[in-house]
Amino acid sequence: MPQLTAALIIDLAAAGEMPEGMNAHIFPDGAFKAEDGRPASLTQGELKAWRMDAAIAAALVDALAASGKPILYDYEHKSLYGDSRAAGWIDALAHVPGRGLFAHVDWTPDAVEAVAKKVYRYSSPFFSFDRDNGEVSRLLSVALTNTPALPDLSAVDLTRRFLPTEKEAEMADKEDVAALVSERDGLKTTLAALTAERDTLKTERDAATTRLAEIAAAEAAKTAEAEKAEHAALMTEVKEKGLLAPVHHDWAAGLALSALRAFVESARPLAALSRQTDGKGDAPAAVLSPSEAALCQKMGVSPEAFIAAKKGV
């Protein structure tokens, strides 16, 4: 069922004789409304009056008993704005046919004095109601107040929609702005920290990249130096062991290391064989030319077979 909330004001002094054990008049009986048009103005004219009767009152009495908690009686409905200081506590409700709903309020000493001295004169219940039929569905709180809207103070006077005052709204806006500014500053601080961390990581990455490049360059230089030394050693072997005729030394020197290594590997057996069959000292009697060595290697012919074939020509 659709529910709305409202408040109204009753003259404490004009409530008449109280039922036994009760000391506050909360609602009148039957249909009731305010002279300013409420609840019609709250419901776009759909609801003409609120309602209180024995059945409605019984539901409120049962709800209070089931909750096990008294209902707050505050000052000027300030509990709606966060100030929950109590003027008293409703611990019992009773319905009187034709008169309405009454309550027993356990007043605080300050409230007793305020009512006695007429510092406060009116009672204002804050309640929810059924939009379809106007029945009071829940008593939320009651307040001592001095803000009647009508001259007939012995009847229901006012329904109020509890919206923030202009000052309260302004304060709330300022608090919201302060919260947003604080959040913005926090985000800026976080962003600055993340930016600094990013820059640090970038610097570390650049340093690592530079170091890796230096290591790679050093390794490349070391490898090049080793290959240069191996190439020189192979050329020395070519010359000292007569693996090639001197006229072909420049050709061998121009070979890449892998090619020169392959040539020397294939030419060594030929040189050894030449020394064994020459009989005239260490100098080789015959050596293969580069083209012969390449042909021998390409055809898969052993150096011995090649030399023997060459001698038989």
Image (tube, rainbow, N blue to C red):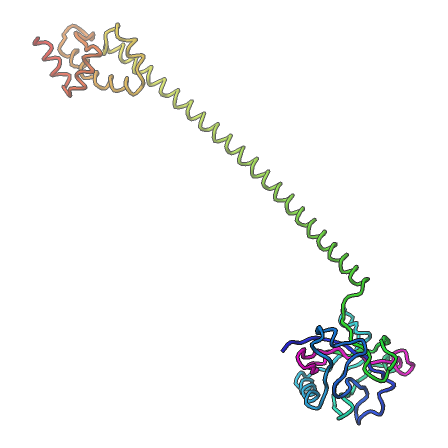
**In this view, 41 is above or below 68:** above
Q: Position of residue 263 (x, y in %)?
A: 24, 17
**In this view, 167 is above or below 149:** above
Q: Position of residue 177 (x, y in %)?
A: 74, 54
- Extent of the magenta region: 113-140
User: In the rendered view, does 90 fall on the left or right side of 153?
Assistant: left
Residue 106, by quadrant, is bottom right
The residue at the point 39 percent across, 20 percent down is 225
Q: Position of residue 84 (x, y in %)?
A: 77, 73
Position of the C terminus, as image quadrant, is: top left
**In this view, 110 is above or below 186:** below
**In this view, 3 is above or below 194:** below
User: In the rendered view, does 190 fall on the left or right side of 52?
Assistant: left
Farthest residue toward the front? 45
Seen from the viewer's position, the closer of residues 216 and 33 is 33
Residue 47, by quadrant, is bottom right
Residue 90, by quadrant, is bottom right
Q: Position of residue 89 (x, y in %)?
A: 77, 82
